Image: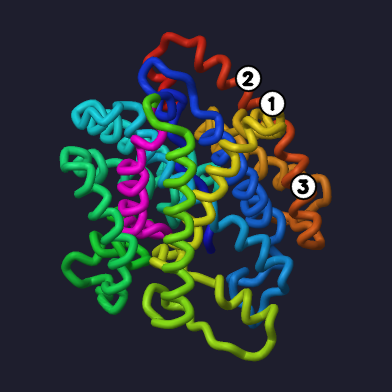
Amino acid sequence: MSRADLLSLPQNEAVRPVSGPRIMAIDALRGLVMLLMLVDHTREFFYLDRQVTDPMNLDVTDPALFLTRLAAHLCAPVFVVLTGVSAWLHARGDAARAGAFLAKRGLFLIVLEVTLVNFAWTFDPAPETYFLQVIWAIGLSMLALAALVHLPRAWVAGLGGALILGHNLLDSITLAPDAPGHALWAILHQRDLIALPWGAAARTSYPVLPWIGAMAIGYAAGPWFGREANPKMRGRALLLFSAGSLALFALLRAATGYGDTQAWTVSGNMPRDAMAFVNLTKYPASACFLLLTLGIGASLLNLFERAEHRGAGAAIRWLAVLGGAPLFFYLVHLYLLHAANRAAGAVMGAQGLTSVPSVGWIWALAALTAVPCWFATRWFAGVKRASPAWWMRYL
């Protein structure tokens, strides 16, 4: 079962150019996709006895559930690419500084995934299966980028693009659990279970090759957001990237058959055909999946930056609160959802997790959950800014 769609969760220092202010549009975009993530995780916790095994399976899924899950597909790609942008802004292109930040931050996220994040999902300190999800993938991608930043920026961009567009050439390579290199290949590209020495297993929900590519693209785009960058030029660059990504997605999806393992054919049922066209492979993230989501994300970032100066500043600032301390929000919302579900089950005398009756309830419950999470995140961001403690950078 897929779970986290989240995100990159870089910290306050990671999105602030040296001696410069935070970029509100970046925080607002993170805030928006975190709200979509909150909806999807509400579905994970509160729709268990009514949802299908795969909410993207059009043969058994109603459109409302399909579209709810589809909206969450923006989350991981946007967060990962913004992690790359943030790494560049943190170091202003200084490879040594960027590499040190990425290496330490990446290791921290890997440890966090197998401890606090897994416990948030299971409330079990020794689960039979550890889910290596988006936080794990971001951590490993940061470690990879820590090495790549020492290359020329054009090489980083080229390698990122090659990983995004070319990793589907490896789809036919599969290794059996007892084959040499299986664990490494499961981490890189083959979503699978890895046996652990003490009898548990690790599920590589997010194979990392395409995510390394997305983060590298973000790092290469970092100078677009520097203090010296012209906002109009940045807007044109974002729109050009968006248009190119979406056009290439449409070409690959409609004409070539390359770039995704999900088949798509015309059936004559227009709504179903439209859903099938965007029903893309996320595990591992296909070329088509990343082209579509990153193209939309670039357009949204440009839109948010324009909206900030055209009468929508209040909404942008509200979203930016959530994007100002995203790791804190991520942990808080998981624990809050799980605890609320357990409490509801205890009140109703239910065994295990309890469910709401419809997709509409998922959105309503997510909206209610967003309110305390917003206030908690705003409080923590203030505490973090005021704290001199070095370790607060990692929270």
Image disc number at residue 379: 2
Residue 161 at x, y percent in the picture: 30, 58
State the separation of the CA atoms marked 2 and 3.
Answer: 22 Å
Q: Is residue 141 left or right of residue 3?
A: left
User: Residue at left 27%, top 75%?
Assistant: 174
Quadrant of the rendered structure where residue 20 is?
top left
Q: Which amino acid does label 1 sit on?
A: Phe
Residue 102 at x, y percent in the picture: 29, 34
Helix, strand, or loop for circle 1?
Answer: helix
State the separation of the CA atoms marked 1 and 3.
Answer: 17 Å
**Up-down relation of residue 22 to residue 356 (above or below):** above
**Up-down relation of residue 16 to residue 367 (above or below):** above
Instruction: Looking at the picture, tell me which residue is in the foreground, 242 or 102.
Output: 242
Helix, strand, or loop for circle 2?
Answer: helix
Determine the main secondary structure of the stretch shown in magenta.
Answer: helix
Is the Cβ of the residue at disc 2 closer than 8 Å to that at disc 1?
A: yes
Quadrant of the rendered structure where residue 93 is?
top left
Classify mark 2: residues with Cα within 10 Å, few (<14), some (14-19) or many (20+): few
Q: Pointer 3: what residue?
A: 365
Give the extent of the magenta segment.
Answer: 201-226
Residue 88 at x, y percent in the picture: 32, 33
Classify mark 3: residues with Cα within 10 Å, few (<14), some (14-19) or many (20+): some
Q: Pointer 1: what residue?
A: 375
User: Residue at left 66%, top 68%?
Assistant: 66
Is tag 1's residue or tag 3's residue first in the polypeptide sequence? Answer: 3
Direction bottom: furthest residue: 267
Q: What residue type is labelled 2?
A: Trp
Is the Cβ of the residue at disc 2 closer than 8 Å to that at disc 3?
A: no
Residue 86 visible (yes or no)? yes
**Up-down relation of residue 87 to residue 366 (above or below):** above
**Up-down relation of residue 101 to residue 356 (above or below):** above
Residue 34 at x, y percent in the picture: 59, 43
